[in-house]
Amino acid sequence: MRASRSSTLMLALAATLLVAGCGRAATHSEATMDQHPQHSPEALSLGRITPRDPGATLELLSDAVGIDGVIDVRHIAYGDNLSPPLRWTPVAGAGAYAIILEDPDAPMEHPFVHWMIWNIPGSLDALPEGLPNADRLITPQGAIQGKNDNGSFGYFGPRPPAGTGVHHYHFQLFALDGPLTLHSDATLRALVDAMKGRVLADTELIGTSEAPERQ
């Protein structure tokens, strides 16, 4: 009886190790799906694109995201709703960059799109705070912003509905081989399709936000 129980435990442990060692590690959003039953089954943009060099070093940082991961009130829709300052490590050969901000914890069929900006010049490694809510920008020159799911061009900050807990906001950065020929009315799907095969490297920065107790 003891030998049988021991054999069963060893087989279960081996199966666990096999699963843990196969494939890509679970993302933060995947790991929290059980905690967020409203979590959308649709993949984030980062999961739909395979970069040319998956091992390339690319890091995205922002002073707007605290060490605890919480996004500063200046950059949420309950606050000042300003686009956050962002900076990243340059990618050799990048002709342009694109950024997509999505909330997969939104209570809807797909992740809520908070921001789409592309054709950021490849010579840049940062964006300032508070970009205008316009489709075509003078600074950075040539950059284009699409419509967010709130219906406006440019950035729309986190505004998680009350009672839905902590939401995770994925700032996804893509280093491209050159500018995209897309108009500002392009949908998220059109943007993702246009980037396929042209992404040199990608990365993401995840920030969190929760509805204030008093609105």
Image (spheres, rainbow, N blue to C red):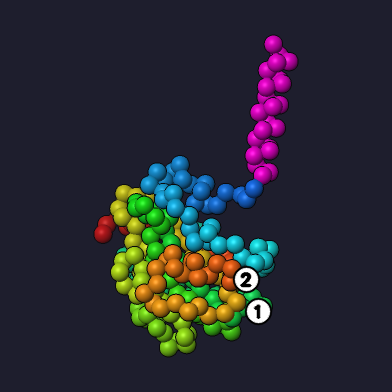
Where 214 falls versus 148 (above or below)?
A: above
Quarter of the image for residue 155 reads bottom left
Q: Please state, as top left, top right, bottom left or bottom right, where the C terminus lies in the image.
A: bottom left
Q: Is residue 152 visible?
A: yes
> Which residue is at the front of the view, 81 or 141?
141
Q: CA distance from mark 2 to mark 1?
A: 8 Å
Mark 2 touches mark 1? (CB < 8 Å): yes
Identified at 64% across, 39% down, the residue is 19
Mark 2 Cα shell of 10 Å, populated few (<14), some (14-19), many (≥20): many
Q: Which residue is mark 1?
A: 93
Horizontally, residue 177 falls left or right of residue 117, namely: right
Which residue is at 54% across, 76% downward?
97
Residue 33 in picture, x, y percent from top left: 46, 45
Q: Which residue is mark 2?
A: 200
Residue 141 spot, x, y in % from top left: 47, 87
Residues rendered magenta in the picture:
1-22
Callout 2, which amino acid? Answer: Leu
- Is residue 7 inside the magenta stretch? yes
Q: Residue furthest right?
A: 3
Q: Secondary structure at mark 1?
A: loop
